[in-house]
Amino acid sequence: MLDQNQDIEFSDHDLEVIEEALFTQEKILSVQSRAGGNGAKTRLSELQGLLQRMRRQRGDKAGQKTGQRLSLWGQVTRMISC
């Protein structure tokens, strides 16, 4: 199968919106996979790979925001579980 890459231009804001939506989807799939969804596990692995590639390509700026979101997510989950 041929691997076809296309160059699509997005603004930094567009990429932030997309990354935040994918981050939310990652959390949803994580919950579904823990509940035993095999399809969710597969999709979660694919999504995590995509997010890693996005973060590497966008550089430190995206990593900093992701770290902030992960920290916030950790705080929210701790509050819920208490």
Image (cartoon, rainbow, N blue to C red):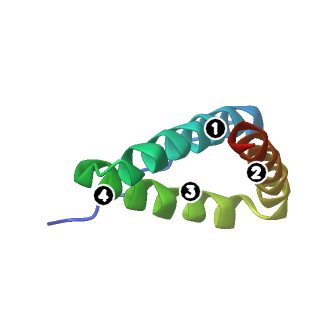
The three-letter amino acid code for the residue at tag 4 is: Thr
Q: Secondary structure at mark 2?
A: helix
- Cα gap from disc 2 to disc 4, whole angstroms: 23 Å
At which x and y percent is residue 37? 28, 48
Is the C-beta separation of discs 1 and 4 under 8 Å?
A: no
- The answer to whether one can see residue 8 in this image is no
Q: Nearer the viewer, mark 2 or mark 4?
A: 2
Find the distance from the CA under tag 2 to the CA under tag 3: 18 Å
Residue extending furthest left?
1
Question: In this rendering, would 29 be left or right of 57?
Answer: left
Q: Which residue is mark 3?
A: 51
- Counting residues from the N terminus, which is met first, the one under dot 4 or under dot 3? 4
The crowd level at tag 4 (other Cα within 10 Å; few <14, some 14-19, many 20+) is few
* Residue 26 locus on image (x, y percent): 52, 46
- The answer to whether any part of residue 64 appears in the image is yes
Label 1 or label 4, whichever comes before in sequence order? 1
Mark 1 residue element:
loop
Q: Which residue is identified by label 4?
A: 42
Residue underneath mark 1: 10
Q: Give how far apart the Cα atoms at labels 1 and 4 are.
A: 27 Å
Disc 3 residue type (three-letter)? Leu
